[in-house]
Image (tube, rainbow, N blue to C red):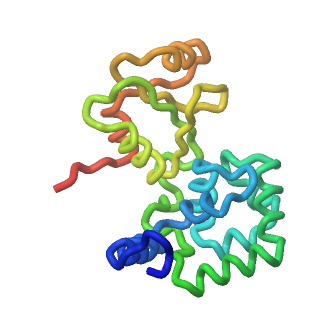
Amino acid sequence: MQLERFAEQSASQLVRAIEVSKEKPLSNLLFGLGLRHVGKTVAVLLARRFGSMAALAAADQATIEAVPGVGPTIAAAAAAWFAHDDNRVLVAKLAKHGVNMEEGDAAPAAGGPLEGKVYVLTGTLPTLKRSEAKSLIEKAGGRVADGVTKTTDTVVAGDEAGSKLEKAKTLGIEIIDEAELKRRTQWKPRP
């Protein structure tokens, strides 16, 4: 409240926002820490694979590189970040102040039906928003990529699918619809 332009209500709202942010999953924290080469997608991959900050911090470069979607440059940068004492002290301080250090329920179960598979979404799906389809795939152990490449396993195509669908056909990549995605991810409607 002593800061310029901060009244009691503004200060209270800021404190509440900070408390809420402490509960976010590990992937948000990893992204927020600004590890070199670790963007939002890679932060999710790492958080879901390791489950906790302690497990990731204890992993060596080779273990990090073994995560599908993480290459040697990213693995080296992440391992180097955790090797610095200053960064370990920062993580300890954050934990001491109640910042969540685990991915929690967002992590897929080991051995999910899509584990290790790369999916690409294209077009408009009949009932699922893109974010919902992505969440289904990730919770089933799969990974969602932005573009179709030789490493893509499956393309989920909806209405008005464009160049991604054409590229998948050219490369001979499996193409499925929303109904098949729901079947594979064992989707269940909300009650």
Q: Residue furthest bottom?
A: 96
Q: Is residue 169 left or right of residue 7?
A: right
Seen at 68% across and 52% down, the residue is: 38
* Residue 80 percent location from the top left of the image: 83, 64
Q: In terms of image quadrants, where is residue 53?
A: bottom right
Q: Is residue 71 rendered to the left or right of residue 105?
A: right
Residue 49, visible in the rendered structure: no
Q: Residue furthest left?
A: 191
Relative height, residue 179 to residue 87 (above, below): above
Does residue 28 show up?
Answer: yes
The residue at 83%/72% (across/down) is 84
**Rendered location of residue 189, percent (x, y):** 22, 49
Q: Position of residue 179 (x, y in %)?
A: 31, 33
Q: Residue 111 appears at what percent x and percent y?
A: 52, 57
Query: In this rendering, is residue 144 above or below 37?
Result: above
Q: Residue at x 75, y 73 (%)?
A: 87
| Of residues 146 and 90, the one drawn nearer to the viewer in this rendering | 90
Q: Nearer the viewer, residue 106 or 21?
A: 21
Q: Is residue 75 above or below residue 144?
A: below
Q: Residue furthest front?
A: 4
Q: Is residue 117 depicted above or below 44 in this figure? A: above
**Image quarter (top left, top right, bottom left or bottom right) of the C terminus:** bottom left
Q: Residue at the spot x=39%, y=46% of the render? A: 185
Looking at the rendered structure, the number of numbered marks drawn on it comes to 0
Q: In terms of depth relative to the viewer, which is nearer, 83 or 7? A: 7
Location of the N terminus by quadrant is bottom left
Question: Residue 152 is drawn in which quadrant?
Answer: top right
Residue 96 left/right relative to 13:
right
